[in-house]
Image (cartoon, helix red, strand yellow):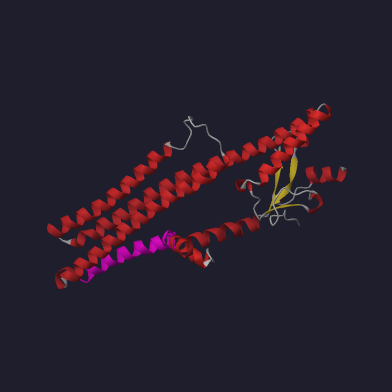
Amino acid sequence: MENQVHLMNECPVDGCLVLGRKGPSYSMYNTRYYVNRKEQRQHASRTYLLDECLPCYKYENQSAVARALWSVLRSESFLFLMQTLVLSIGVSKECLDLRHRYPGVHFYQTVLETAITCLHICIRLMVVWMEFHAIKKPLAEVGYVEADSSVRGKYLYKYLLGYVVLGISTVLISWILFAIFHGTTHLGWTLLTNNLFIVANTATASLMKTRLALLYFEVREDDHKVALFETVLLLRESFLLRGDEERQDYLNRVERFLTAFKNTPYFIQPEHIHVLMEYVPDWNIYKSGEQITVV
């Protein structure tokens, strides 16, 4: 027991948490669980690569073709390709002087340029809308909110709806400007307007996604702290037990907490978090197939 205490308090493992650094030295505690930082970086890189660069490899099930196709359309690499295509079409039609040499080709090329611009904007609208609901779903599954509570996430809808209205207005304005340029001056101006709309929509989408991401991570961090403080509260209550009846009630409450914890996907143990071999408990709170990894 003394060796274990010595190891916990004096010999931290790379990736473990050192608690109590701001307090007295005797109150410091090194966690027996630790994070493998290399595996963590690899997991983050693999997730980003699959989501943004190679989304078609994310879904191996052939029945998920539509889902895989959408993952390709919403990826930043594909959206960047669309933006580059719009710019290339606009520059080529003006450099080749199609407006004077081939007016028909110039007209249809401008239609294609504007259509791709609107498709780019619509895809970003759908991405932000779906990310909002993707963030809201797991938070709603673990959190409890009274029906008459003012904290129901509705305040985000005004920003989301504002972004959607702005995007739809941009699509309408792009076609209105197309008609105005075609009837008054020439369609060469769409090179400027379409790329300006793409840049503006990309910037506003980035701001909206950043706001959603910050909210998600803040709420997620607070939820994990609530679960942690509940664990601390259970530990403190173990020192106040008096009699067999209180002890039995306490054990039942702990058992219910462990069962509820393992049945909450929100708190699933990542693959890069491990526990030292000498501290592996005899019991396992995780489901079969999700065993604690040891070293």
- 279 on left or right of 53: right
Q: Position of residue 256 (x, y in %)?
A: 70, 39
Q: Position of residue 49 (x, y in %)?
A: 52, 62
Q: Is residue 4 above or below residue 49?
A: above
- Bounds of the magenta segment: 72-96
Q: Quadrant of the C terminus?
A: bottom right
Residue 97 visible in the current orientation: no
Residue at 46 percent across and 44 percent down: it is 212
Residue at 17 percent across and 70 percent down: it is 104
Q: Quadrant of the N terminus?
A: top right
Count of marks placed on residues: 0
Looking at this view, name the residue that lies furthest to the right: 2
- 279 on left or right of 88: right
- 295 on left or right of 145: right
Q: Position of residue 287 (x, y in %)?
A: 69, 52
Question: Magenta span has 89?
Answer: yes
Residue at 20 percent across and 68 percent down: it is 106
The quadrant where residue 85 appears = bottom left
Residue 88 visible in the current orientation: yes
Q: Nearer the viewer, residue 202 or 289?
A: 289
Question: Magenta span has 290?
Answer: no
Residue at 42 percent across and 39 percent down: it is 156
In terms of secondary structure, what is the magenta stretch mainly? helix
Looking at this view, name the residue that lies furthest to the left: 184
Q: Position of residue 99 (x, y in %)?
A: 17, 68
